[in-house]
Amino acid sequence: MSRSLSYIAFIAIAFIAIAFIAFSILDINYLAPKNYIMISVSAQFEQLRAKGQAALIPFLTAGDPDLDTTAKALSVLDQNGADLIELGIPYSDPLADGPVIQAAATRALNQGTTFARVMSMLHSVAPHLRSPVILFTYYNPILNMGIEKFLQSIYDAGARGLVVPDLPLEESEVLLQPAAEIGIEVILLIAPTSPPERMKAIAEKSQGFIYVVSTTGVTGMRDQMAKGAKEMIENLRTLTDKPIGVGFGISRPEHARQVIEWNADAAIVGSAIVKRLAHEGGLIEVAELCASLKRAIGHVG
């Protein structure tokens, strides 16, 4: 019996030691006691450009596996290389999302995650983050709540940016104008199928940065980056000096490095983060991935 107890005690001590080492290396602090001044998306890009740095933008689905974990994950990402953080509001019909993020949204909704609960969580966490938070949601929930009420709610909660993947360019002004007045920057997406004149119109209207969708289809992890993204970035550089972020398909450090070498200003990583967070030990895995992604993009120029 004494040997069994000694063995159990040894295992427990070893586990604690491993956890301590991991948390020390990866700078994980769930309490995030510091209060930061919440800056805009544009201001963050300006600061990074002044330092010669590219931006890392990880994505989370709020409420997966639960909102307490989401709050911790926001702090973990913020402390391990994230420059901005995209937070997805779970929606029952996520047309732009691939299977990993769709499954995360389903789990979150099944957990009882609501817009109000996400805003309450964000309100408590956002003041402790250095990274501006960008909300990702679909257009229908915004219309159902009312545009100005929605925008004011997310601003008060601490969000400073907004991505609406199914927002038609032709209707964007209805959202862009009140958002600018409240202090929310609406980031518009450019797809590989966008003709040059449409790319120019989107670049002119997009606030904060321009979100380049690297490949056709939905979000998700891929083995390599679509080379068409390089041409899109090159074309955009002739149209605008606004920051360019590339997403859809970035899952590895080498992918992130590739788009920065193609002259993008930011790498956006979603499914790879969400997949790791979905199981036990996910916070440490997310911290490791985030840190490795930031090391990969390093300095630019």
Image (cartoon, rainbow, N blue to C red):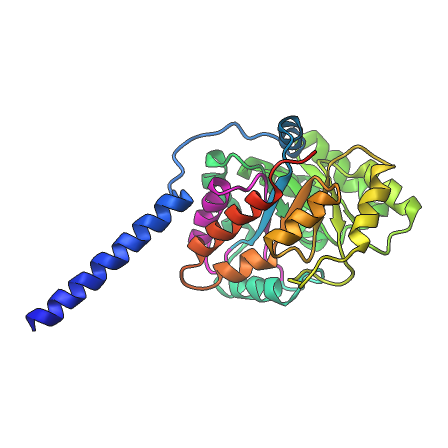
Q: Position of residue 46 (x, y in %)?
A: 67, 28
Magenta segment: does it hold 80? yes
The N terminus lies in quadrant? bottom left
Residue at the (40%, 59%) spot, across then down: 281
Q: Which of 183 and 178 lies nearest the eye of the viewer?
A: 183
Q: Is residue 87 left or right of residue 65?
A: right
Q: Is any atom of residue 17 visible in this view?
A: yes
Residue at the outermost bottom position: 1
Q: Which of 213 and 146 lies nearest the eye of the viewer?
A: 213
Q: Which residues are magenta?
A: 63-91
Q: Is residue 278 above or below residue 169?
A: below
Residue at the outermost left position: 2
Residue at the (21%, 57%) spot, across then down: 13
Q: Position of residue 23 (x, y in %)?
A: 36, 47
Q: Position of residue 52 (x, y in %)?
A: 65, 30
Magenta segment: does it hold 17? no
Q: Could you say which quadrant of the image residue 201 lies in?
A: top right
Q: Is residue 143 above or below residue 40?
A: below
Q: Is residue 84 left or right of residue 210?
A: left
